[in-house]
Image (tube, helix red, strand yellow):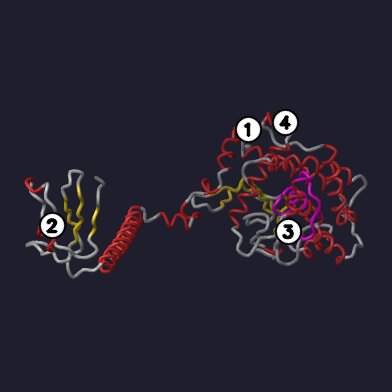
Amino acid sequence: MPRTVLCAARILPRAELPSPGQSSQGPSTGAAAGSPQNGTSPTGSTTTTTSPTGNAQTTEIAHPPPGVNLEGAVGIAMGCLVAGILIGLAAMILFHRRRTYGTRRRAPEAPVARQLPVQAQTPQKLLPWHKDMFELGPFLLDSSSDKDIAGMLDEAGQLIEQHVENNYHAKPVSTSPHELTKALQGLGVEGVDGKGSSVSAATLTSLALESGTRRLALRHLLSLVIFSSMDLDRIRRQKIPGHPPSILPAPMVAFVQAQPGPGLYENREATARAATQWRVLAAYLMNGKRCDRTALEADPEALKAQAAALAQALDAVLAPFARPGQVENLVAVILESARLGYVLVSQPNDWRFEHSRSGGGSSSGGGNENGKKVDAGGLELVVCAGLSRVSCGDQGNLRLRRVRVPVVERIED
């Protein structure tokens, strides 16, 4: 007998299951009559099935409780879902803020280190190649002793003195003071500001034209020009690049002259240290005998040409007072003095020549600045430059250690 499924299309009363004794009988009277039974919900529905044995079975299908429709149930479910999402987002935000606050409390100095890297770190950390400089130390030239350098300066000063004594006369000359003063200014004896010399160009002209003071004036001039020609700092500050000529290696001189002037907000100390390191490395790379760890040696032919050019520039002032053979002897003096320049340019420290008695470097004025008279009407004139070694102090400032004081001659009225 095929299975028959009867679904109630509307609300029907609960059907009673037939007892075993009634299995052969038809449907129950209660089911046929359709009278409701006790305990049956008015909103329930039933499904009646007929088993293969002919017995009818009834299963109750649950419906929402009275007073709650389907749309309301869906709205409540959606509201709970949205509320759960919002609560989860709020919890994530609070957790993230708490982690960030805890990190800041543990490391409050981290933002400062990122904002101010220069103050928070040492120069060695800012410039990693400083480590490479330290590793190059065993290959670079060791610093020469102050005694050896001072001895070389004394020898150069004596050569200048002998050159003046033997190669210039004391006769009167008819040279124009104006032209002589202009030539002196071109050689670095600058005007009344006292820079580069302890006397002005006009005062030095007067001393050179006088027979009794000429030799002291010429010694002062030769000391100033020859030693300044081996001073990279003065070469960089020349008003007219290449005048007077330098006796240092031409590539180094060209690089120094190509550097721009200091900027408005430039760190002078950083620039000075960078220039020192560049000079040391340049001298090392240009040295043909690096393995010997000796000072840079000059190219004889190139140095001879440079010495001749410097002697020619000096001749604009010296020619009126010169004896025959003066130029050849002057070139020899310059060549011998250049040894000191090549040693200084190879040193790990900077060096400064002092052309005034008070010292403080090649550009500082002396107590008799601009050639003023001192004491009992006398005039002091530097006839051989002094020399100071530049070093870095504990606070990073530059300090000068005087190795040789300037040789000063007094001229009485």
- Badge 1 element: helix
Residue 162 highlighted magenta (yes or no)? no
Coordinates of residue 37 in the picture (x, y in percent): 8, 62
Residue sitting at the far top: 292
- Badge 3 element: strand
- Badge 2 element: loop
Q: Amino acid at mark 1?
A: Phe
Which residue is at the front of the view, 348 or 177? 348
Task: Locate residue 122 relative to residue 406 in the image: left or right.
Answer: left
Dot label at residue 15: 2
Q: Amino acid at mark 3?
A: Ile
Coordinates of residue 156 in the picture (x, y in percent): 74, 43
CA gap, disc 2 and disc 4: 120 Å
Which residue is at the front of the view, 150 or 122? 122
Please state which of the two labelled residues, at mark 2 or mark 4, is closer to the viewer: 2
Q: Disc 1 marks which residue?
A: 139
Q: Disc 3 marks which residue?
A: 411
Part of the protein shown in magenta: 225-251
Coordinates of residue 397 in the picture (x, y in percent): 54, 53
Please state which of the two labelled residues, at mark 2 or mark 1, is closer to the viewer: 2
N-term-proximal mark, 2 vs 4: 2
Q: Amino acid at mark 2?
A: Ala
N-term-proximal mark, 2 vs 1: 2
- Cβ atoms under marks 3 and 1 closer than 8 Å: no
N-term-proximal mark, 2 vs 3: 2
Q: Amino acid at mark 4?
A: Lys
Q: Quadrant of residue 341?
A: top right
Dot label at residue 289: 4
